[in-house]
Amino acid sequence: MRFTWVACQPDCRGWVSAIGIVTSESPKEFDEFARGRDLAGATVVLDSSGGSVNDSIALGRRFRNLGLATTVGTSIQIHSAQGNRAGVAPEAYCESMCVFLLLSGKSRYVPEAAHVRVHQIWMGDRADDAKAATYTAEDMMIVERDIGRLAKYTFDMGGAGDLLSLSLNVPPWEDLHELTQEELRLTNLVTTDLVAEVLPKTRGSIMPLATLSAKPMQDRFVSTTTDDEPIAPGAKSTKTAEAAVPTGGSAAAPAK
């Protein structure tokens, strides 16, 4: 996952842009990003396909310890007659374990144009063809252990059991389930309907909007661009090196 500070001074404080897949390096990379910065109470803007279960849990606990707020969006640079300014495009994706990063925010806002989608966690090296793969008793132990860790984390963050129920009912060979506005409230993923509680105002506009083309339902890696320029390198290729570890919450591999 790539972390970038998006400054909108002198108009506002700014926010953290968090883009991409959560890997084993992500918690350490966030620690390095946070070092020397006063992030207490800042907002994280998420655009992610998910990633490792345990590393997402570790990263989410770091977010909560800093009292961060969370939302879904893509940080962009808006060009206008009045000059360039930072903004957030609301049509972005937060999928699989990204949903549990969203849950870590003390305040959580999801714009109507955003896509929040869930499915089961699975063994990372077998999620591409889960039905055809074989599994050992140790594999099942790892999955059960990680589900337990995820359940504890969910309740620690103030989430509802409905979030686990909705997620664990969708196997990796089915389409991800996109949460409705009602389900976002039912699961406690949303704590506010006011964008002003998570994003700072910038000269009379709270959340500058831009339109992004929707991604296909099955596409977790491809992003499109608009005339607005992404602030951080957020375009995801069809298959990145990181994506070799499946994006869906993937249970940790057995220790060697």
Image (cartoon, rainbow, N blue to C red):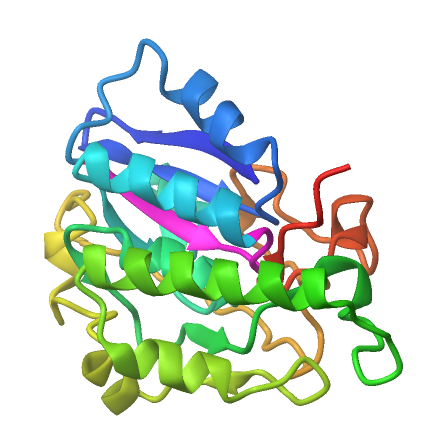
Residue 40 at what x, y percent from top left? 17, 28
Quadrant of the rendering where the N terminus is positioned: top right
Q: Nearer the viewer, residue 182 or 231?
A: 182
Q: Quadrant of residue 134?
A: bottom right
Residue found at x 54% / y 34%:
26
Give the left or right position of residue 193, taking residue 59 as reference: left
Of all residues, the one furthest to the top in this rendering is: 36
Which segment did they paint magenta?
42-52
Residue found at x 71% / y 40%:
255
Of all residues, the one furthest to the right in this rendering is: 132
Give the left or right position of residue 108, taking residue 249 as reference: left
Number of numbered discs overlaid on the protein picture: 0
Is residue 13 in view? yes
Give the left or right position of residue 247, taking residue 148 as reference: right
Residue found at x 19% / y 43%:
202
Q: Nearer the viewer, residue 106 or 155?
A: 155
Residue 240 at what x, y percent from top left? 80, 49
Q: Nearer the viewer, residue 189 or 4?
A: 189
Q: Quadrant of residue 125?
A: bottom right
Give the left or right position of residue 16, taking residue 109 as reference: right
Instruction: Identify whether 15 is placed above or below 217.
Output: above
Q: Quadrant of residue 140?
A: bottom right
Instruction: Identify whether 219 is placed above or below 16.
Output: below
Residue 13 at what x, y percent from top left? 20, 30
Q: Nearer the viewer, residue 100 or 210?
A: 100
Quadrant of the rendering where the C terminus is positioned: top right
Residue found at x 17% / y 62%:
158
Instruction: Identify whether 170 is placed above or below 95.
Output: below
Is residue 72 in view? no
| Residue 47 within the magenta-colored segment of the rendering | yes
